[in-house]
Amino acid sequence: MQERISECEAIQKRLKRSVKTEKQSDQKAFCRLMLQGQVKRTLKFVDHASHIDRKHDITTDIKKKLKEKHPKTAELKQCAITDMPETKTERVIFENITQDEIASITKNSSGSGRPTQIDMDTWREIMCSKSYGTHSNILADEIATLARRLAMDTIQHNCISTLLACTLVPPKKKDDGIRPVGVGECLRRIDKSLAKHS
């Protein structure tokens, strides 16, 4: 009888370790997909994994809590301004942002599209497919112009507020709290990737 009990305890410990390993693996997958910007795939993954905290439904109460978490605007404090001289960046280094660079970045990018719902698969189809002919090159050239302007010029926020807009996704924390995740436009991600490559 004691042998049977010992055998059952050994099996039970092994099952617990297996479940723990599975949870850790799923958590890593969740983090990896979020860092890649693949929110749609992440949410599907969460919905199919019973032991992962799901996202909150968007209700009036959740919207209120998300607003509370958003930092309020405040007056600029002089102590926050550095006395170091401004580093000048030569404009010429951004001249290599071309339509070919745009197409290359788009081809190797992935992620969901928010708030317009135009995901990277759609951008890749528009920019890299031959179906659109010269229109793809014209669009890529315009995006390259936008990227150069963002890198070199000071642009008022109200002129690019739509480009900077994000959709807030509220995944659940373990204590049923909210972890707000902002998902921006794919076009903005293309421009940011170009800035890093320049």
Image (cartoon, rainbow, N blue to C red):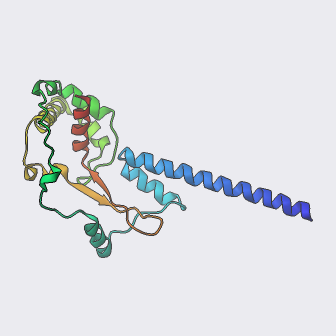
Q: Quadrant of the C terminus?
A: top left
Tell me where residue 4 appears, x and y as whole percent.
Answer: 88, 61
Residue 117 shows in this picture: yes
Tell me where residue 78 appears, x and y as whole percent.
Answer: 12, 53
Residue at horizontal 44 percent and vertical 45 percent from the top: 32
Residue at horizontal 63 percent and vertical 56 percent from the top: 19
Q: Is residue 9 above or below residue 96?
A: below
Residue 131 shows in this picture: no
Q: Residue furthest bottom?
A: 61
* Displayed quadrant of residue 56: bottom left
Residue at horizontal 38 percent and vertical 46 percent from the top: 35
Q: Is residue 36 above or below residue 17?
A: above
| Of residues 121 and 5, the one drawn nearer to the viewer in this rendering | 5
36 left or right of 78 in image: right
| Of residues 112 and 173, the one drawn nearer to the viewer in this rendering | 173
55 left or right of 143 in image: right
Q: Quadrant of the N terminus?
A: bottom right
* Displayed quadrant of residue 55: bottom left
| Of residues 69 and 104, the one drawn nearer to the viewer in this rendering | 69
Tell me where residue 188 appears, x and y as whole percent.
Answer: 22, 43
32 left or right of 61 in image: right
Tell me where residue 93 appears, x and y as whole percent.
Answer: 16, 25
Q: Is residue 35 above or below residue 62?
A: above
| Of residues 143 and 147, the one drawn nearer to the viewer in this rendering | 147
Residue at horizontal 57 percent and vertical 54 percent from the top: 23
Q: Residue furthest right?
A: 1
